[in-house]
Image (cartoon, coloured by chain):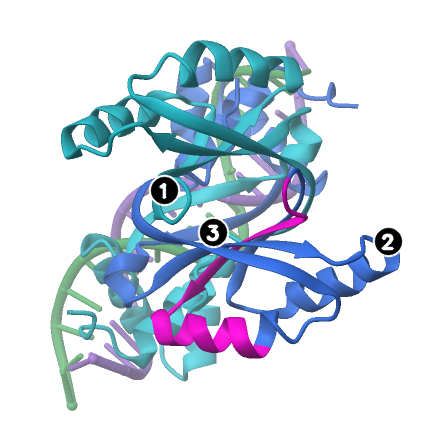
Chain colours: A cyan, B blue, C purple, D green
Amino acid sequence: MYSDLDDTDRAILKILENDSKTIAKTIAEQLGLTKTPVYERIKRLEQEGFIKKYAAIINKEKVESSITVFSFISLEVQKGAMMDDFLELVNQFPEVVECFVVGGEFDFLLKVIVKNLDAYYTFAKTKIASLPNIGAVKSAFVLKEVKDEIAFPLL
Amino acid sequence: MYSDLDDTDRAILKILENDSKTIAKTIAEQLGLTKTPVYERIKRLEQEGFIKKYAAIINKEKVESSITVFSFISLEVQKGAMMDDFLELVNQFPEVVECFVVGGEFDFLLKVIVKNLDAYYTFAKTKIASLPNIGAVKSAFVLKEVKDEIAFPLL
DNA sequence: ACTGAAACCGGTACACC
DNA sequence: GGTGTACCGGTTTCAGT
């Protein structure tokens, strides 16, 4: 299932997830190849969905003021249909940049980015609290971002 | 502090964080401009650090088996120097893809990606537990990834 | 699957407004 | 800060192995 990638493909992925602007010639040199096979492999990785997309990673501290908050949410009853309803709604909130179903003390973990504390209050009050079937909601405010990798730890 | 970006710059950032391969001509058409100013603005955004880097976003489900775990860690005593020591060590662990200092019930929130439960056990035992000054550690295992945006919610 | 060369097209530089 | 043109270099294609 994960095996139609060889070491060369993995090496290419690792280079591109760290710098997608690396030119084919440079990659080829690192792998002891020429441009063409590198190019063809990248195309295959794109077409078969190993590479989801290419993105510019923005330095959000420089672009605009914002705060990051983690929200831990428990539902009152964990019926499958209710979870789906909940997730579909949450998914549409642009403030929610990450959303996971987790096991443990609570059911969902959300990473929320908003302009300021006031915006978070509004978000929590008008969007989260109005969702159906909500039990407990806890929040953890980010004081400092120590690490925030986009790259998946390959190898 | 955040104001040396105009609406055109923001529009360019928004396009590039969703698809960094969008060619200058296309961006120019959307903004009613020509290639040159778009090109110059992008260069400025790169040089001044608004764009941190360009990355290929990998579909990790397809590439290899892995699990994601959130770890919530409290220190025994919150002395500044001890927090720095802790963070410097945690930062070096490749399994830790995100690390935040938070306010609330615990001090740090870590997002960890490992191959499987066994690898998480090893990570927790050999790396987390051996850090100095650790109080409580709780874990929440990700059962389903509902949303995982890389793009910062601009506008 | 990889090499090497040729064609194509987007990024880059520049002269001018 | 913008346009239009021209050049250069990386991507893309292809014939050959």
Residue B29 in sight: yes
| Labelled disc at residue B80 | 2
Number of marks drawn: 3
The quadrant in which residue B8 appears is top right
- Tell which of A92 and A132 is nearer to you: A132
State the residue at coordinates (15%, 29%).
A81
Left or right, residue B123 beside residue B107: left
Left or right, residue A83 beside residue A114: left
Is A55 placed above or below A136 here? below
Q: Quadrant of the N terminus of chain B?
A: top right
State the residue at coordinates (35%, 51%).
B142
Q: Secondary structure at mark 1?
A: strand
- Tell which of B119 and D14 is nearer to you: B119
Q: Position of residue B20 (x, y in %)?
A: 44, 40
> Rounded to the nearest whole Å, what is the CA distance between mark 2 and mark 1?
31 Å
The quadrant in which residue B15 appears is top left
Count residues near mark 2 (Cα–Cα under 10 Å), then give few for <14, some for 14-19, many for 20+: few
Left or right, residue B115 beside residue A29: left
Q: Earlier in the sequence, mark 2 or mark 3?
A: 3
Q: Secondary structure at mark 2?
A: helix
Q: Chain of mark 2?
A: B
Identity of the amino acid at label 2? Gly
Say whether residue B149 is magenta: no
Is A7 placed above or below A12 here? below
Q: Position of residue B70 (x, y in %)?
A: 48, 53
| Labelled disc at residue B55 | 3
> Rounded to the nearest whole Å, what is the CA distance between mark 2 and mark 3?
34 Å
- Where does label 1 land, which residue? A100
**Magenta-tinted stretch:** B105-126
